[in-house]
Amino acid sequence: MSQNSVISVNSQIHLSEFRSADQAACVEFLNDREIYDRTLRIPHPYTPASFEQWLTILEQSLSKHGQRVNWAIRNETSFLIGGIGFDDLEIGKSHRAEIGYWLAKPYWGRGIMTAVVKRACQYAFDVWGLAKITAHVFLFNAASARVLEKCGFQQEGLLRQHHLKDGQLIDAYLYGLLRDA
């Protein structure tokens, strides 16, 4: 798959590269405190400089992997509404990777993220040959846990005081999805 490819999720949603033109949408959506509270790696406040840093990270990742491992989630008009990607991955060598994602609040509760996670996991299994995909979910993020469970992930454990965010130690559930499950 080339670096400019689009991954179709359904007739309304697709995944593609992040673009410079996505800056305004990212700054608007990612300044929502509820998104910040539920994610580990998104800074707050989210500024144009944060977005530029993100584009640099994406370019470094593309160079390292030779292909995308992070995508913009776009609606039928190609407007950015979220992001999804994989971490802890070395394509061709890793047997597993961790998935992470966010969705703009106006699009919550529509089944979009469930469809996107299913499609991204299918891609990771089929294209990269992964055997397992993991996810960490803060205990208070029931909506994200439901998304993963609808996609076939199973809760594998409780990671006590596993993450440090804003000076607080946070517990998280560990979820896993096996290719052949």
Image (tube, rainbow, N blue to C red):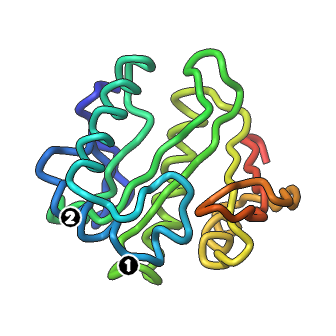
The residue to which callout 2 is attached is: 25
Q: What's under tag 2, amino acid-wise?
A: Ala
Q: What's under tag 1, amino acid-wise?
A: Lys
Secondary structure type for disc 2: helix
* Residue 48: percent from left, percent from top: 20, 54
Residue drawn where x is 49% and y is 57% of the image: 101
Q: Quick check: 93 above or below 140?
A: above
Q: Say whether residue 15 is left or right of residue 101.
A: left
Query: 157 or 53: nearer the eye?
Result: 53
Residue 105 is labelled as 1
Q: Quick check: 37 above or below 73?
A: below
Mark 1 nearby-residue class (10 Å; few <14, some 14–19, many ≥20):
some
Q: Say whether residue 75 is left or right of residue 34.
A: left
Q: Earlier in the sequence, mark 2 or mark 1?
A: 2
Mark 2 nearby-residue class (10 Å; few <14, some 14–19, many ≥20):
some
Secondary structure type for disc 1: helix
Q: Say whether residue 34 is left or right of residue 152.
A: left
Quarter of the image holding residue 158? bottom right
* Residue 18: percent from left, percent from top: 25, 45
How many labels were placed on the picture? 2
* Residue 63: percent from left, percent from top: 35, 18
The N terminus appears in which quarter of the rendering? Answer: top left
Disc 2 to disc 1: CB gap under 8 Å: no
Residue drawn where x is 82% and y is 61% of the image: 155
* Residue 108: percent from left, percent from top: 43, 80
Residue drawn where x is 35% and y is 72% of the image: 104
Quarter of the image holding residue 52? top left
Q: Quick check: 29 above or below 135?
A: below
Q: Say whether residue 78 is left or right of residue 85.
A: left
Residue drawn where x is 62% and y is 32% of the image: 88
